Image: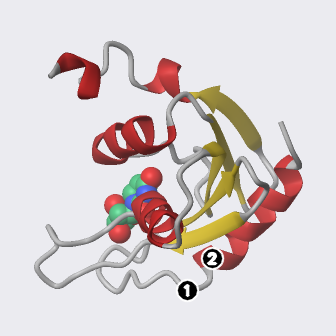
Amino acid sequence: MGDQQALIEAAREARKHAHAPFSHFHVGAALRGRDGRITGGCNIENASYGLTVCAERVAIFKAMSEGQREFDAIAVVTDADRLTPPCGACRQVIWEMCGNVEVVLANLKGQVEVHRMKDLLPLPFDARSL
Ligand code: THU
């Protein structure tokens, strides 16, 4: 289960680097490997909009590019009153790359909610479907 607070704090820190000149919606994510290593990510927007990459995917791709393959939790932090769940594209990527991890949603007010990935993406399409 690990230290949820440390994961949220890492996502809050990552959020400070968000590049969101179009939406002004700053998102931070932090992914924890089974070895305890934490990798942060922020959303990075693009003028073409569609090339924007969410904070969750930035964190996952950073960690994987550094050799990590096994994860147990991901945190998502925003300043929204309604906690921010991962978008559909990120749910697919989290499921495929991280499996049934804990998904910790938090905001700057200190509200926290914990979900399991299998509940956020029921009946997934994945490698078993091919
Ligand atoms: N965004 C994320 O980074 N993660 C989420 O879970 C939801 C949405 C970003 C994408 C875009 O830069 C901005 O938030 C508004 O959609």
Q: Residues within 10 Å of mark 1 (few under 14, many from 20)?
A: some
- Residue 3's tag is none
83 left or right, relative to 5:
left
SS type, badge 1 = loop
Residue, far top: 123
Q: Position of residue 39 (x, y in %)?
A: 63, 68
Q: Nearer the viewer, residue 130 or 38?
A: 130
Q: Position of residue 41 (x, y in %)?
A: 53, 71
Q: Residues within 10 Å of mark 2 (few under 14, many from 20)?
A: many
- Label 1 close to label 2 by CB (< 8 Å): yes
What is the number of callouts on the image?
A: 2
92 left or right, relative to 58:
left
The part of the image, by quadrant, that contains residue 124 is top left
SS type, badge 2 = helix
Q: CA distance from mark 1 to mark 2?
A: 6 Å
Residue at 49% over, 21% down: 118
User: What residue is pinned by disc 1?
Assistant: 17
Residue 115, compared with residue 96, is above or below; it is above
Q: Nearer the viewer, residue 2 or 14?
A: 2
Q: Position of residue 71 (x, y in %)?
A: 62, 46
Image quadrant in which the N terminus is located: top right
The part of the image, by quadrant, that contains residue 19 is bottom left
Residue 119 in sight here: yes
Disc 2 residue type (three-letter): Ala
User: What residue is pinned by disc 2?
Assistant: 14
Disc 1 residue type (three-letter): His
Image quadrant in which the C terminus is located: top left
Residue at 48% over, 71% down: 62
Q: Nearer the viewer, residue 74 or 130?
A: 130
Residue at 49% over, 81% down: 18
Q: Position of residue 47 (x, y in %)?
A: 16, 85
